[in-house]
């Protein structure tokens, strides 16, 4: 069943357009704007260009989804297969199925929302031309990662996003941005070198780099020793990007230093590339190797769940001087631990849970980083002690709609039933209760119990954050007004906003000076452009929580086929 009947050739064009258009848009962003499109100033024109390109890509992705045959989500659709390097049998092979389509839509949506947000509130730093071009290159690389079906093309697309994200952090980030950017690039590049060796080993030993053919073969053309080595090498590179404990230490620094848009894309899109590689490459192509390492992967996953939660609890406690963005970053370590645990079960239930948790994390954590950036803009800091101790009634009393949305995102993140975060964690734990044949059931049930304990820790720190940031804490300093930082101030305190950058959105009033007897001076509440940017994420979080069959109906047949060695 398709919503709209679209011919195969048009579907091919749409997928190719989705992958290539952002790259062409990045080149165009660096060129002078045509006279009729300059708007009020060149900076506004290039930011509008970013919105236009990402909007066109999102529309194309939605049309592609409506033309997708939902009765056969396990079948590769909109495929393009062109010989590129005949000597190595490397092909430009594109296609989507029920596993990759949701990730494609998530990437297109988040990038468009980030471009729209940046149009009204550009991050402080160098030229908006470079910023827009880097965001578009990053989008192209991420979309290509989810669309290509050749191992070497996958590696090229996987690496394509590193340089744009490095510069987004290093040039438009906040304090310690250069150190965080270097840490990000060193970790990911070192992991990628090892991953390339594993991909080459598979391709050369099997005689092809075609991911569909390799998945259909289901490892029969590779010896167990080759599979074990390949899983170890590729898994390290994917685990760094996921990130898996203990290879996660680059993530909190990168998120803390990155501009709001950089944090949203890093959490909502880039982290998904690592887990997608586990599902698309290692599970079907090297099943014996995965079975060997599955208990270790599950063990690292549950350690990451508990470690991430304990780190968040430490940051959230009073007097710890914890940073809200850093806390959300550590929460991502825990949430991605659930994704890895589901993959490690090697069961349809667990893998479907992992894919659902991937999408839920992208929606919820993307929204959380948007909100954390907004709070930092208004108060001039993301320090939890300052937000809670020096603000009296805090967000509920000063910006009630912003406080309510932050509380909503927090309870969605802790896995409240009825919201998107619940289903992925529940299915992952069900998968761990009954892992695939050949895996130790007692060990995985132990992992399930530890993961379930991690959900309690997650609820604990998220509720503490809501209580402190949204309700505040009465203290001797509760009469103090927050820093008089307008909501549309540059995100980074150490770099002034370029003159004339972006359109002049309606500037909210500065926080009011406390009047006699008043303890809750008002802040600018959610602005129109913020509501437009954040509403789709909140709505989809509710939709996925109330109607999970929409997503599971896409992923389950594709996962069943993948685990069965290409047999439906």
Image (cartoon, rainbow, N blue to C red):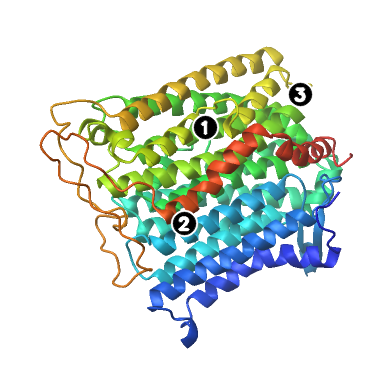
Q: Is residue 34 visible?
A: no
In space, the residues marked 1 and 3 are separated at their CA atoms by: 30 Å
Q: Secondary structure at mark 3?
A: loop
Residue 500 location in percent, x, y?
Answer: 32, 73
Where, by quadrant of the figure, is residue 222 drawn? top right
Residue drawn 54% across and 60% down?
Answer: 138
Circles 1 and 3: CB atoms closer than 8 Å:
no
Residue occupied by mark 2 = 165
Residue 392 location in percent, x, y?
Answer: 22, 31
In front: mark 1 or mark 3?
A: 1
Q: Is residue 123 above or below residue 564?
A: below
- Quick one: 496 or 246, which is closer to the camera? 496
**Image quadrant in which the C terminus is located:** top right
In space, the residues marked 2 and 3 are separated at their CA atoms by: 37 Å
Residue drawn 40% across and 48% down?
Answer: 183
Q: Secondary structure at mark 2?
A: helix
State the mark number for residue 412. 1
Disc 3: CA contacts within 10 A as few (<14), some (14-19) or many (>=20)? some
Pointer 2 or 1: first along the chain: 2
Where, by quadrant of the figure, is residue 473 drawn? top left
- Quick one: 547 or 496, which is closer to the camera? 547
Residue occupied by mark 3 = 436
257 on left or right of 563: left
């Amino acid at each position: 069943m398709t919503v709209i009947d679209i011919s195969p050739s048009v579907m091919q064009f749409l997928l190719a357009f989705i992958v290539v258009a952002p790259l062409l848009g990045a080149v165009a962003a660096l060129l002078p704007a045509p006279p009729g499109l300059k708007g009020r100033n060149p900076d506004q024109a290039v930011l509008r260009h970013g919105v236009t390109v990402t909007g066109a890509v999102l529309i194309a992705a939605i049309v592609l989804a409506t033309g997708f045959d939902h009765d056969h989500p396990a079948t590769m659709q909109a495929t393009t297969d062109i010989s590129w390097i005949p000597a190595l049998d490397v092909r430009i092979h594109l296609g989507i199925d029920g596993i990759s389509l949701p990730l494609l839509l998530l990437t297109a949506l988040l990038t468009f929302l980030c471009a729209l947000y940046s149009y009204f509130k550009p991050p402080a730093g160098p030229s908006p031309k470079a910023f827009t071009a880097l965001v578009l290159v990053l989008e192209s690389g991420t979309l290509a990662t989810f669309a290509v079906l050749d191992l070497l093309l996958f590696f090229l697309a996987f690496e394509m996003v590193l340089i744009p994200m490095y510069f987004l952090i290093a040039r438009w980030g906040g304090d310690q941005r250069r150190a965080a950017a270097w840490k990000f690039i060193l970790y990911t590049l070192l992991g990628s070198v090892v991953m390339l060796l594993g991909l080459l080993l598979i391709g050369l030993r099997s005689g092809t780099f075609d991911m569909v053919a390799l998945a259909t073969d289901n490892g029969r053309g590779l010896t167990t020793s080759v599979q074990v080595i390949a899983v170890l090498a590729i898994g390290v590179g994917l685990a760094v990007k996921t990130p898996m404990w203990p290879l996660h230490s680059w993530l909190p620094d990168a998120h803390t230093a990155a501009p709001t848009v950089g944090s949203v894309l890093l959490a909502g899109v880039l982290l998904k590339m690592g887990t997608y590689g586990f599902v698309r490459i290692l599970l079907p192509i090297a099943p014996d190797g995965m079975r060997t390492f599955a208990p270790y992967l599950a063990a690292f996953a549950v350690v990451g769940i508990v470690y991430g939660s304990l780190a968040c609890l430490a940051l959230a406690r009073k007097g710890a001087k914890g940073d809200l963005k850093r806390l959300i970053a550590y929460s991502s370590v825990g949430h991605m631990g659930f994704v890895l645990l589901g993959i490690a079960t090697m069961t349809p239930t667990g893998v479907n849970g992992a894919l659902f948790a991937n999408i839920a994390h992208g929606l919820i954590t993307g929204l959380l980083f948007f909100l954390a950036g907004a709070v930092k803009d208004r108060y001039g800091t993301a320090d939890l002690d300052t937000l809670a101790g020096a603000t009296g009634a805090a967000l509920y009393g000063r910006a009630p709609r912003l406080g309510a949305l932050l509380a909503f995102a927090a309870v969605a993140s802790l896995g409240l039933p009825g919201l998107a975060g619940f289903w992925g964690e529940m299915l992952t734990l069900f998968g761990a209760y009954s892992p695939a044949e050949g895996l130790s059931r007692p060990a995985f049930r132990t992992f399930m119990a530890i993961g379930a304990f991690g959900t309690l820790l997650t609820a604990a720190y998220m509720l503490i954050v809501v209580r402190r940031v949204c309700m505040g804490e009465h203290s001797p300093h509760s009469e103090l007004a927050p820093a008089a930082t307008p909501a549309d101030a540059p995100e980074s305190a150490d770099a002034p906003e370029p003159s004339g950058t972006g359109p002049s959105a309606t500037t909210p009033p500065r926080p009011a000076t406390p009047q006699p007897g008043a303890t809750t001076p008002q802040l600018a509440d959610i602005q129109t452009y913020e509501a437009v940017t954040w509403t789709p994420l909140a709505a989809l979080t509710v939709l996925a929580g109330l109607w999970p069959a929409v997503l599971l109906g896409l992923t389950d047949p594709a996962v069943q086929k993948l685990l069965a060695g290409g047999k439906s």
